[in-house]
Image: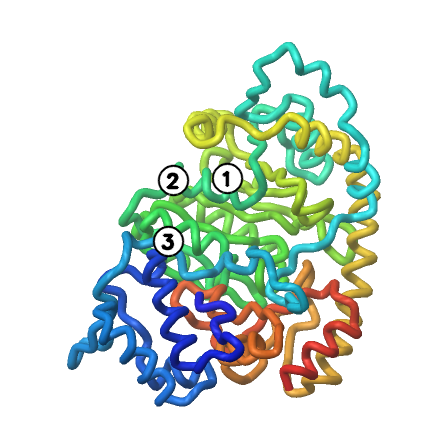
């Protein structure tokens, strides 16, 4: 949350006090929030404890924080809380010269560059309408439904809701199913954007371990008995681990969901970025349609700047989601949806291009990491846009040190509901080997 707080020419204690005050003024550290201990703060920020003590002292003298015996240091002043802990800060503009290794978002594919350079054909057909299609343009809903059907998940256009990207889709699904105080089950680790959504919704998050074999089904069974409001999971190219559940494990998971009747939101944003070229199967089609809401996107396949995602659910669920969506943004822009519909006719070309890019990128990333950081380890069975690496050291402290040399990292705690995964780090696999090697050498 502090970001690049160190200011050239300014004493470290003054810069730290200023950065903390910015967080307090913005509401990220609301009144009553407990700050990390001076020892923890100093260790993570790679500064002396005296520096932290001086920074805290400045804020305490001004009445912004108070050190209470036995209760730690708490914020005294500040605006209403902004319920975020910075997991989505990766998507803020990076300063010039910063090497951003904190996000796996890919640049635009060749197919997207070519198609999006042209004005969407056929947009004039909609000029006589009011321009609002809350469920999405019929032509795009049909294209997404047709693609899912070809991929093995029988889908009708009435089961598709077009959204402004996958994060918007996650937001709508979470808002539909979860109220403040509700219990939600998630994987540990899991997609950091969904953790952010659940925090915003005021949910009580409980975790189920995710490993190379998939979710711990025994623990999940015990959790589902308590009738949580929702389960969020990823059975296809899991973010951040890059692992995919086996068909038998997924079938057992589907049986558990059907038996307990708990709604599940499944993130399938990377389901077609497999090395084999065969899209990974989903829970959709294996679980009752009224229980599963599937999240997808065109960002991974084509380009994040397109801002087109989708939800697949039962027609009844889709109608509920549409009504909620109307109160927020009415509909997605027609021009982008027309461009997306056109791109959907080139899915196979885009998949081949992405597969080649990620295969070469993964091989070079593994080679570079192995050469520059030989003590780091990872699973060879990972797919998707990232490499989930065990650094065998404090990745949060590593990320803080990286800021000092102009590098952004995505440490493991950002993917954990309880700030776990302390030694883990997620690296994108598509950067040029020379850039990645240079960044890692600077870290070491």
Q: Nearer the viewer, residue 199 or 390?
A: 199
Q: Nearer the viewer, residue 191 or 121?
A: 121
Q: Are marks 1 and 3 in contact (CB under 8 Å)?
A: no
| Distance Cα–Cα, label 1 vs label 2 | 10 Å
Residue 245 seen in the current view: no
Determine which residue is flagged by label 1. 293
Determine which residue is flagged by label 3. 199
Residue at 78% x, 53% y: name it.
354
Mark 1, secondary structure of its residue: strand
* Quarter of the figure with the C terminus: bottom right
Q: Quadrant of residue 98?
A: bottom right
Give the class, few, some or many, for how many residues have Cα within 10 Å of label 1's Cα (few <14, many ≥20): many
Mark 2, secondary structure of its residue: helix
Q: Position of residue 47 (x, y in %)?
A: 44, 86
Residue 347 seen in the current view: yes
Q: Position of residue 193 (x, y in %)?
A: 50, 54
Q: Nearer the viewer, residue 160 or 227?
A: 160
Mark 3, secondary structure of its residue: helix
Residue at 51% x, 59% y: name it.
89
Residue 234 against residue 293 in the figure, above or below: below
Determine which residue is flagged by label 2. 177
* Quarter of the figure with the N terminus: bottom left
Q: Position of residue 408 (x, y in %)?
A: 59, 69
Q: Left of 312 or right of it: where is 342? A: right
Give the class, few, some or many, for how many residues have Cα within 10 Å of label 3's Cα (few <14, many ≥20): some
Q: Earlier in the sequence, mark 1 or mark 2?
A: 2
Q: Earlier in the sequence, mark 1 or mark 3?
A: 3
Q: Nearer the viewer, mark 3 or mark 2?
A: 3
Q: Left of 113 or right of it: where is 320? A: left
Q: Are marks 1 and 2 in contact (CB under 8 Å)?
A: yes
């Amino acid at each position: 949350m502090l970001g690049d707080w160190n200011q050239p020419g300014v004493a470290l204690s003054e810069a730290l006090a200023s950065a903390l005050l910015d967080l307090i003024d913005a509401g990220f550290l609301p009144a009553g929030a407990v700050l990390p201990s001076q020892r923890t703060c100093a260790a993570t920020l790679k500064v002396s404890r005296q520096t932290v003590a001086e920074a805290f002292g400045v804020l305490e003298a001004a009445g912004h924080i108070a050190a209470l015996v036995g209760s730690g240091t708490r914020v005294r002043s500040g605006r209403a809380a902004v319920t975020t802990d910075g997991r989505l800060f990766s998507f803020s503009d990076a300063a010039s010269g910063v090497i951003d290794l904190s996000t796996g978002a890919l640049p635009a594919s060749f197919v997207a560059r070519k198609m999006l350079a042209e004005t969407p054909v056929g947009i004039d057909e909609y000029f006589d309408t009011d321009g609002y299609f809350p469920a999405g343009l019929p032509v795009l809903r049909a294209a997404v439904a047709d693609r899912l059907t070809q991929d093995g998940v029988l889908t009708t256009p009435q089961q598709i809701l077009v959204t402004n990207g996958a994060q918007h889709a996650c937001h709508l699904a979470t808002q539909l199913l979860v109220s403040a105080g509700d219990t939600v089950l998630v994987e540990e680790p899991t997609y950091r954007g969904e953790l952010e959504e659940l925090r915003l919704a005021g949910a009580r998050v409980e975790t189920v371990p995710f490993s190379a074999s998939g979710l711990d089904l025994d623990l999940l069974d015990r959790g589902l008995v308590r009738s949580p409001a929702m389960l969020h999971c990823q059975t296809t190219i899991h973010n951040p681990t890059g692992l995919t559940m086996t068909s038998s494990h997924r079938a057992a998971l589907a049986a558990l969901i059907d038996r307990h009747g708990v709604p599940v939101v499944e993130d399938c944003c990377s389901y077609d970025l497999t090395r084999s070229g065969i899209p990974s199967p989903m829970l959709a089609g294996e679980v009752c349609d009224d229980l599963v809401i599937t999240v997808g996107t065109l960002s991974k396949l084509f380009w994040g700047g397109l801002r087109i995602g989708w939800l697949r659910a039962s027609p009844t669920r889709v109608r509920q989601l549409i009504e909620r969506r109307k109160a927020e943004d009415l509909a997605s822009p027609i021009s982008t949806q027309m461009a997306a519909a056109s791109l959907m006719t080139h899915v196979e070309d885009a998949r081949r291009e992405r597969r080649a890019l990620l295969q070469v990128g993964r091989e070079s990333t593994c080679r570079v990491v192995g050469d520059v950081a030989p003590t780091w380890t990872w699973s060879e069975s990972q797919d998707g846009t990232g490499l989930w690496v065990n650094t065998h050291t404090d990745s949060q402290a590593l990320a803080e040190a990286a800021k000092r040399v102009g590098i952004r990292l995505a440490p493991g705690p950002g993917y954990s509901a309880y700030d776990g995964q302390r030694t883990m780090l997620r690296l994108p696999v598509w950067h040029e080997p020379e850039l990645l090697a240079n960044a890692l050498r600077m870290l070491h």
